[in-house]
Image (cartoon, rainbow, N blue to C red):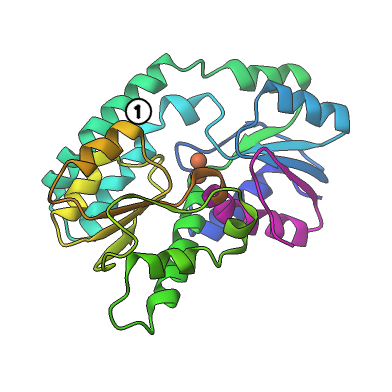
């Protein structure tokens, strides 16, 4: 049995974090947790389902309410450091993120940040969400599998990276395939980056910042149609691969499910979490 703090610390440890990021939180704490229901999006319906089926705790991946939604931009701003680590000047990184940050801020302002967590409180059902820590696990796994997959190829192409990604068991269970949104699978892979674990994707402007600073291929989890069109009409754009939202999120979440099971908990995945045996 575990309590919600111990479960949170387990996730933080897997990601190498020492504090809870802004998009992650314990909304209703609980002790003596044995049965866990985990999903990517967990709303009031899933909370009722958990109660009905006798679960002790519901874990969502996406920010479920409270400050995990209203302060979500803090996690999106981590993309600035990702760009700086990749060699982009701080001021250009900041400018590149601004359009996406504006959208995120507006969305947070509109969001009913209380809907789901007020339901959990009324039910007296322990409820938490773990977002960035598991996206960091996801980013690490994608980076490692691509590195490994193209290591022995002299001039790897985008399709070689796609083949490597498809070897991840979560990608094999998931129903979507990684797609080349911009560019071509036959293009050279060149310098590449997995631009994940920044709350959400950085949109067209962050992708452009990478393309303008020596990167030829970017791996996002997802990208909006308008951003795809903007990049497709840009002659300096390289390759943008969207790895597929739900299957990719599972790449980060499945190791957490295994770790909870190793602690003796009974964990049931649902709502888009695919866990290979
Ligand atoms: Fe995610
Ligand atoms: Fe997601």
Q: How many marks?
A: 1
Residue 259 rendering spot, x and y as whole percentages: 69, 59
Query: Is residue 124 in view from this perspective?
Result: yes
Q: Is mark 1 within 8 Å of ligand 2?
A: no
**Residue 8 shown in magenta:** no
Q: Which residues are magenta?
A: 248-277
Residue 250 rendering spot, x and y as whole percentages: 59, 51
Q: Nearer the viewer, residue 194 or 262?
A: 194
Residue that numbered label 1 is attached to: 104
Q: Is residue 226 left or right of residue 247?
A: left
- Secondary structure of the residue carrying tag 1 is helix
Query: Is residue 19 in view from this perspective?
Result: no
**Quarter-wise, where is residue 99 in the image?**
top left
Q: Is residue 121 left or right of residue 98?
A: right
The residue located at (52%, 63%) in the rendering is 166
Q: Nearer the viewer, residue 266 or 164?
A: 164
Residue 102 sits above or below residue 249 on the image: above
**Quarter-wise, where is residue 13 in the image?**
bottom right
Residue 79 rendering spot, x and y as whole percentages: 30, 46
Q: Classify the position of the C terminus by image quarter.
A: bottom right
**Residue 274 shown in magenta:** yes
The residue located at (43%, 47%) in the rendering is 221
Residue 155 sits above or below residue 47 on the image: below
Residue 241 rendering spot, x and y as whole percentages: 36, 53
The residue located at (56%, 59%) in the rendering is 14
- Pointer 1: residues within 10 angstroms few (<14), some, or many (20+)? many
Residue 62 sits above or below residue 154 on the image: above
Q: Is residue 254 left or right of residue 140?
A: right
């Amino acid at each position: 049995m575990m309590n919600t703090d111990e479960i949170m610390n387990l996730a933080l440890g897997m990601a190498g974090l020492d504090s809870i990021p802004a998009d992650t939180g314990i909304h209703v704490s609980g002790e003596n947790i044995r049965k866990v229901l985990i999903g990517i999006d967990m709303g009031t319906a899933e909370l009722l389902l958990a109660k009905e089926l006798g679960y002790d705790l519901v874990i969502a991946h996406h920010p479920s309410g409270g400050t995990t939604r209203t302060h979500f931009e803090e996690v999106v701003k981590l993309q600035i450091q990702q760009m700086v680590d990749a060699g982009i000047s701080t001021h250009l990184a900041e400018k590149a993120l601004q359009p996406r940050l504006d959208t995120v801020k507006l969305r947070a302002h509109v969001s009913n940040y209380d809907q789901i967590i007020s339901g959990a409180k009324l039910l007296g059902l322990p409820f938490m969400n773990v977002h960035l820590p598991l996206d960091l696990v996801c980013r690490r796994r994608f980076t490692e599998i691509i590195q490994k997959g193209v290591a022995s190829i002299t001039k790897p192409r985008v399709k070689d990276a796609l083949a490597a990604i498809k070897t991840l068991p979560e990608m094999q269970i998931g129903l979507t395939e990684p797609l080349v949104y911009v560019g071509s699978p036959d293009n050279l892979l060149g310098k590449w980056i997995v631009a994940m674990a920044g709350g959400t994707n950085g949109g067209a402007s962050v992708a452009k910042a990478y393309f303008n600073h020596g990167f030829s291929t970017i791996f996002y989890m997802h990208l909006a149609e308008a951003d795809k069109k903007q990049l497709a009409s840009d002659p300096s754009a390289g390759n943008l691969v969207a790895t597929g939202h739900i299957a990719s999120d599972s790449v980060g979440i499945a190791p957490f499910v295994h770790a909870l099971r190793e602690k003796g908990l009974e964990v049931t995945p649902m709502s888009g979490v695919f866990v290979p045996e």
